[in-house]
Image (cartoon, grey):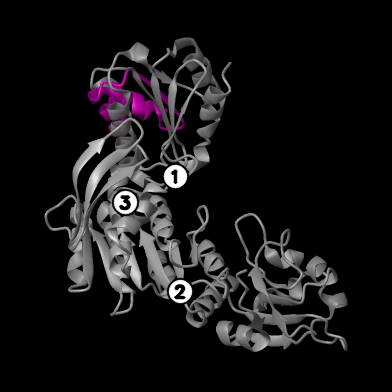
Amino acid sequence: MNMPILWTIDDLTKATKGELLCRGESASFSGVSIDSRNIGESELFVAIKGQNYDGHSFIGDLAKKGIGCFVVESKKVPDIPSYNDLAFYKSKKRKFTCIAVKDTTKALGDLASFQRKRANVSVIAITGSNGKTTTREMAARILEQRFDTLSTKGNLNNEIGLPLTLLNLGHRHRWVVLELGMNSPGEIGRLTKICRPDIGIITNVGPAHLEGLGSVEGVKNAKGELIDNMNPDSIAILNADDPMVLGLAEKRPPKTILFGLSQKAMIRATSVVGKDVGNTFTLNLPKETVQVDLQTPGSFMVSNALAAAATGCWIGFSAKEIKKGIEEFKPIKGRMNLCETKQGVHVIDDTYNANPVSMEAAVKSLVSLKGENRGILIVGDMFELGRQAESLHEKTGKLSAELKIARLYASGDFAGAVAKGAMAKKMRVNDIITGTKSQIIEDLKDNLKPGDWVLVKGSRAMGMEKIVEELKSWE
């Protein structure tokens, strides 16, 4: 059993540099929570103000239920419901502890940073426009063969999610594998300072989050914040096949490991062969080679595997162990998952998220997988592309036509731009359908044939998985 690292009141005030408003009966706490619905009896509550809720509004009820410690924002204390009857300052029987800070989101990061420092762990931090989650999972599969390993769950990779992951550290953990996401400049830098990685990985740089970053150069600089804020003795693992990432390598000589297909790479893949359900390749390490059978479609998955392999190699895992970890990887829901309907239609579910780079890679994978069969593409809007959104959606349409996609469906505000791009490259108008998800599903059921390959992809908020679910349940 992995016992939690307990928090004392002195730990909390030291970590947050907060003001102790009152000291309660409990001397220690088993963990940190921001969720009033699922907080454990022995955990402390950090009142975060989100887009749709304010944790301060739940403090009164939580105190009455026996929660023993709260971290609150100083300016919010007078506005907390039940403030008067809870008597933060005046109660003779202070049953709970209350610590006031300027910003509870920052305090959450401060608590996580404190946890990282006192835990006996090493940290891997992964960022990039694409491939973060897959690389994270592959690296974790390698590490788990020898060490108790904690890793990011789901999409907990921002200024709230990353601290929550670190706060789950227990006494037995030895490694942490973290995913670092961002929407604006400075975010990766702040997350890096919180987690202080021993190993930092940048998978690639592409046109994602352009709304907040302005340009691909802006994306490069934002991803480079990982390198800029790592300790001098940490290791950077970078993609030798990506010119943008390769440019960042100049910041970190000599403690840099390059991975890729390039001759420059220390960790290389050669003899790459795509198959219906995955890829095989020869993994070339500095002192060993091994044949890897990756059970995940998409040639871009090889790059993710190389990033994970570079991590394992640096830590000291053998080629055999690295191979085992990579081959044990199973695709995460909504990321290049394959299924076959009762009608014999092959569906590729890549609905977890989308940006122009991952969209292009997924469409090329569809073409590779379908062989001589029909390839059908269903796309939803790609978000956070700013002023380039129209042209980048047009580019998806153009690519679809150039790669001879048999039928193109588009849904969302930029469906017209996708259609415009496809028509510009002479795709037949009758093979381009725009509409709601319900309309698309109806048309699919009238036009799909046994042997067809269908790729469904779009940004998370588009809910494109509804189409996948309908096709799976199609009688």
Q: Nearer the viewer, residue 117 or 145?
A: 145
Q: Which quadrant would the N terminus be assigned to in this image?
A: bottom right
Q: In which quadrant of the rendered image does the C terminus lie?
A: top right
Quarter of the image for residue 455 reads top left
Q: Position of residue 6 (x, y in %)?
A: 64, 79
Verify whether residue 406 appears in magenta: yes
What amino acid is labelled 1 in the image? Lys
Q: Is residue 451 visible?
A: yes
Task: Indicate the amino acid at tag 3.
Answer: Ala
Give me the residue at 28% from left, 32% from top. 364
Residue 280, horizontal then vertical, whole percent: 27, 41
Q: Closer to the camera, 398 or 242?
A: 242
User: Which residue sits at x=36%, y=33%?
Assistant: 277
Is the C-beta separation of discs 2 and 1 under 8 Å? no
Q: Along the horizontal axis of the image, is 412 left or right of 260? A: right
- Residue under pointer 1: 330
Marks 3, 2: nearer the viewer: 3
Instruction: Specify the segment rendered in magenta.
Output: 394-422
How far apart marks 3 and 2 lie (CA) works out to: 26 Å
Taking 157 as reference, is 327 left or right?
Answer: left
- Please tell me which of labels 2 and 1 falls first in the chain: 2
Mark 3 Cα within 10 Å, few/some/many (few <14, many 20+)? many
Mark linked to residue 194: 2
Mark number, residue 342: none
Mark 3 / mark 2, whichever is N-terminal: 2
